[in-house]
Image (cartoon, grey):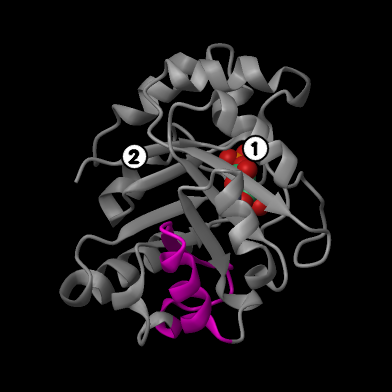
Amino acid sequence: MNHLIAPSVLAADFANLGRDVEMLNVSEADWIHVDIMDGEFVPNISFGIPVVEAIKRYAKKPLDVHLMIVEPDRYLENFKKAGADGITVHFEACVHLHRTISAIKELGCKAGVALNPHTPVSVLEDIIQDLDLVLIMSVNPGFGGQKFISRTYDKIRQLKNLAANRNPSLYIEVDGGVGINNTASLIQAGANVLVAGNAVFASENPGEMIRKLKNSSPE
Ligand code: DX5
Ligand code: ZN
């Protein structure tokens, strides 16, 4: 499968969010990545459900909602109603992960699990077949604009191996510090969804940057 690009609106201009979402609509972006931070699971607060609803009113592309929150089960339905097409929860935030994943699917959303940098891929061994997506964090979650952790390449390869037999159509998403300098290596390692915040929104021509990320090929 050709890789997908999911720009993160965390790096957008919140005072001009409608304009920035319009830019994504006409770009080569595939999904719109929406980062929800609660100030508890991660040391930062981003935005909540009303903002997701507002994004949805403009967005012509699927919303890929990344929940960096404790007890995500409490809010799954609200995020679905707000317009989430996919919901990703953190492995580290879910005691009964299988139940949470089932609930996301019952809502009709793509179900994803995110792994922090210190969490090994092997924890997914008994749930990999139930997932639509695994998000490998390549920075510690909480902030945009951080430095990419290079150990991520091994984790992508491990995940690709784990998924090869049991879930070959799994989306393997990478999030944090992704940009034009590492896109080719990430695809080569097996990633097929690339999240990019600052690389897109801090560039002079975001639409053109998305096009470049989309048209990168494996090394
Ligand atoms: C980090 C978020 C990321 C963030 C990526 O906690 O999950 O999605 O927006 O931003 P960049 O691409 O700037 O590292
Ligand atoms: Zn994210």
The reply to whether the residue tagged 2 has its Cβ within 8 angstroms of ligand 2 is no
Image check: 123 left or right of 1? right
Q: Write down the quadrant of residue 50 in the picture.
A: top right
User: Relative to 186, is 120 above or below?
Assistant: below
Q: Is residue 73 magenta?
A: no
Which residue is denoted by mark 1 in the rendering?
Answer: 53
| Amino acid beneath label 1 | Glu
Q: Position of residue 121 (x, y in %)?
A: 42, 76
Label 2 and label 1: CA atoms lie apart by 23 Å
Q: Secondary structure at mark 1?
A: helix
Proximity of marks 2 and 1: CB atoms separated by less than 8 Å: no
Nearer to us: label 2 or label 1: 1
Which residue is denoted by mark 2 in the rendering?
Answer: 4
Q: Is residue 114 magenta?
A: yes
Q: Residue at x 50, y 82 (%)?
A: 99
Q: Secondary structure at mark 2?
A: strand
Q: Position of residue 142 (x, y in %)?
A: 72, 54
The mark nearer the N terminus, 2 or 1, is 2
Q: Which residues are magenta?
A: 96-123
Q: Residue at x 51, y 57 (%)?
A: 87
Image check: 40 left or right of 113? right
User: Relative to 106, is 67 above or below?
Assistant: above
Q: Nearer the viewer, residue 145 or 89?
A: 89
Q: Position of residue 66 (x, y in %)?
A: 58, 54
Query: Mark 1 packing: few (<14 Cα in 10 Å), some, or many (20+)?
Result: some
Q: Nearer the viewer, residue 203 or 43?
A: 43
Image check: 40 left or right of 22? right
Q: Write down the quadrant of residue 156 in the picture.
A: bottom left
User: Relative to 66, is 198 above or below?
Assistant: above
| Amino acid beneath label 2 | Leu
